[in-house]
Amino acid sequence: MNTLDIDCLRPTQMTHGERQIRHKAEAYRALHARDLKMAIAEKPIAIVLGPDEAPYVIDHHHVAGALLGIGVTRVPFVLLRDFSSLSSAEFWLTLENRSWTYPYDPARRRVAFEDMPHRLTDAQNDEFRSLAAFVRDAGGYDETDVPLAEFRWADFFHARLPFPASDAEFDALLQPALALARSPKAAGLPGFIGDARR
């Protein structure tokens, strides 16, 4: 299986959830070497080639970040598209038209494409992106293939819940966020399940 150096991967989102990355890293760290190898092989990083044939991550930013956090330097990948012949402007517009980029900072302000981070570790922390992942893992909504689904959930929580300034405040948000995810207010979001499984 072909691999790429994680450090050369370019993000297509301005933010990530650092708590989610740490959580994934802890899970990977707990695995025996053989199981870790299998876990890595099961989730190849989805990329597209951009200008200068740079590899841009379309999916599994957090997986790559977590693996980097435990000292893994190379990951398997799957190439979805080769956009290397496009100009930078054409490339980013193509990604946006496919919902393959999220150019917004943690305050939901639009960021110019030229200001997007160049390395995965340069992405800004978004507490609500982590909250969206934790709510999904707790059964608040279903995992889905809809592009940027977890960012849509993060935006939803950001608009309705207070910013968590500490670990305790973040932990205290999980139950209210779960209730919101199951409420009619979340109807229409990707993976919405309502109160069907309460």
Image (cartoon, rainbow, N blue to C red):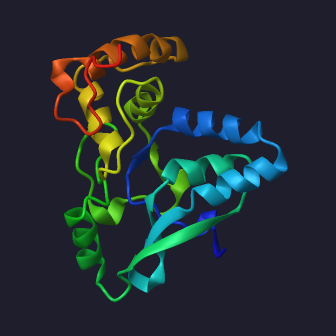
Left or right: where 95 falls relative to 71: left
Question: Does the rendering let one see residue 173?
Answer: yes
The residue depicted at 23 percent of the width and 63 percent of the height is: 96
Residue closest to the eye, 67 or 178: 178
Vertical order, 112 against 190 (above or below):
below
Instruction: Name, please, the residue furthest toward the front.
Output: 196
Question: Does the rendering let one see residue 105?
Answer: no
Displayed quadrant of residue 38: bottom right
The residue depicted at 32 percent of the width and 66 percent of the height is: 114
The spot of residue 173 in percent (x, y) is 40, 14
The residue depicted at 22 percent of the width and 70 percent of the height is: 93
Total marks drawn? 0
Left or right: where 69 falls relative to 153: right
Left or right: where 20 falls relative to 196: right
The spot of residue 74 in percent (x, y) is 69, 65
Instruction: Name, please, the residue furthest toward the right.
Output: 33
Residue closest to the eye, 190 or 163: 190
Residue closest to the eye, 179 or 4: 179
The spot of residue 164 in percent (x, y) is 42, 19
Instruction: Name, please, the residue furthest toward the bottom.
Output: 85
The spot of residue 176 in percent (x, y) is 34, 12
Displayed quadrant of residue 99: bottom left
Q: Quadrant of the C terminus?
A: top left
The residue depicted at 40 percent of the width and 12 percent of the height is: 175
Vertical order, 110 against 83 (above or below):
above
Q: Quadrant of the N terminus?
A: bottom right
Vertical order, 23 against 145 (above or below):
above
